[in-house]
Image (spheres, rainbow, N blue to C red):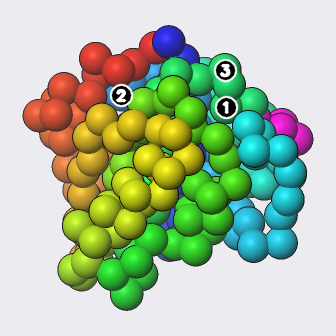
Amino acid sequence: MKTIILYYSRTKKTARVANTLAKEISADIVEIEDLKKRSGPLNYINASVDAMRENKTNIKPQTVDLNEYGLVYIGTPVWAGKPAPAVITLIDKCDFQGKDVILFATLGGSGGKNTILRMKEKIEVRGGRMITSFLIKTAGKKTYEIEDEMKKTVEEMDLKIYGA
């Protein structure tokens, strides 16, 4: 089963979490842009890929076909208790029918649980099933602290079992 991580990051702290996760579980990774102006078929992320790393090599595909993946991680920073608008737009545009989804959020303050619940509701409407979710606090932490916490989370939640 192929695994992909879709995430949005403005401060790059969410990127640090996603990159560490991808390395730990051997997953493909896609950083999405602001999708408000985007359109395209529901099973694809068209012209919305900022970067994709596969086997530690940077690639910039025009389209990522979600049909190729059995498990999808979706990550967002939490802004004022809500997920990043780009992530909600992504969820609204994609067909997650039959897909297992793991949601995660990075937060500097509070509101993470509400963010996860909002994303879960939208995922279920789009046909997906949330397997689990987790929150990573990034406020005031240095890069190595974020990476260490993410590695610990992977172990504690046994997220490696979902790896490729």
Disc number placed over residue 24 in the picture, else none: 2
> Would you identify the image quadrant in which residue 73 lies?
top left
Q: Is residue 142 magenta?
A: no
Q: Nearer the viewer, residue 5 or 45?
A: 45
The crowd level at tag 2 (other Cα within 10 Å; few <14, some 14-19, many 20+) is some
Q: Amino acid at mark 3?
A: Glu
For image coordinates 55% across by 47% down, the residue present is: 126
Residue span colored magenta = 60-64
Q: Secondary structure at mark 1?
A: helix
Q: Are marks 1 and 3 in contact (CB under 8 Å)?
A: yes
Q: Is residue 61 magenta?
A: yes
The tag earlier along the polypeptide, 1 or 2, is: 2
Q: Secondary structure at mark 2?
A: helix
Q: Taking 56 as reference, is 15 left or right?
A: left
Q: Amino acid at mark 2?
A: Glu
Q: Which residue is mark 3?
A: 68
The crowd level at tag 3 (other Cα within 10 Å; few <14, some 14-19, many 20+) is few
Q: Secondary structure at mark 3?
A: helix
Marks 2 and 3 sit apart, C-alpha to C-alpha, by 20 Å
Q: Position of residue 69 (x, y in %)?
A: 59, 23
Q: Main secondary structure of the magenta part?
A: loop
Q: Which residue is mark 1?
A: 66
Marks 1 and 2 sit apart, C-alpha to C-alpha, by 21 Å
Residue 31 seen in this snapshot: yes
